[in-house]
């Protein structure tokens, strides 16, 4: 897939993949709608790339046992190596001198 795809192209590609997955599992659209708890038209819109709600997409992915697709949308956020270097405290080179009572 191309990272420069329009949102319409993304919808069509996701729909194509959902349809292929459904067919591999030998499930018809009506059954998938029932399994997912959504309207048949929502399944048809998803597969045709005409969009639907995120809620419907999540329900369909769960029904098709592909929640891993959702996980790939939310990669773990970590601190970049450059940010770690910026946040690093300078290494100490000397020991602090003892304070005298008069310094307090």
Image: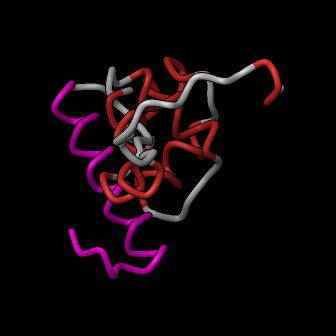
Count of numbered circles in the view: 0
Percent x, y of residue 36: 53, 23
Residue at 34%, 25% (x, y): give it.
Answer: 64
Residue at 39%, 67% (x, y): give it.
Answer: 10
Which color scheme does this rendered protein use? secondary structure
Percent x, y of residue 52: 61, 52
Residue 9 occupies which quadrant of the picture?
bottom left
Of all residues shown, which one is farthest toward the left? 24
Residues 104 and 83: in front is 104
Considering only vertical position in the picture, is 63 above or below 13?
above
Image quadrant containing the C terminus: top right
Residue 23 located within the stretch drawn in magenta: yes
Dominant SS of magenta comes to: helix
Residue at 51%, 31% (x, y): give it.
Answer: 96
Residue 87 located within the stretch drawn in magenta: no
Percent x, y of residue 42: 59, 45
Residue at 42%, 36% (x, y): give it.
Answer: 70
Q: In the rendered structure, which segment of residues is drawn in magenta?
A: 1-25
Percent x, y of residue 102: 82, 25
Considering only vertical position in the picture, is 74 above or below 2?
above
Indicate left or right for 43 with 66 as reference: right
Image quadrant containing the N terminus: bottom left
């Amino acid at each position: 897939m191309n990272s420069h795809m329009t949102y319409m192209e993304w919808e069509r590609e996701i729909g194509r993949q959902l349809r292929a997955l459904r067919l591999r599992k030998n499930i018809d659209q009506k059954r998938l709608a029932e399994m997912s708890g959504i309207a048949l038209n929502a399944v048809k819109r998803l597969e045709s790339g005409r969009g639907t709600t995120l809620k419907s997409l999540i329900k369909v992915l769960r029904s098709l046992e592909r929640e891993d697709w959702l996980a790939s949308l939310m990669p773990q956020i970590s601190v970049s190596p450059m940010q770690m270097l910026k946040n690093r405290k300078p290494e100490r080179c000397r020991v602090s001198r003892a304070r005298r009572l008069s310094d307090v």
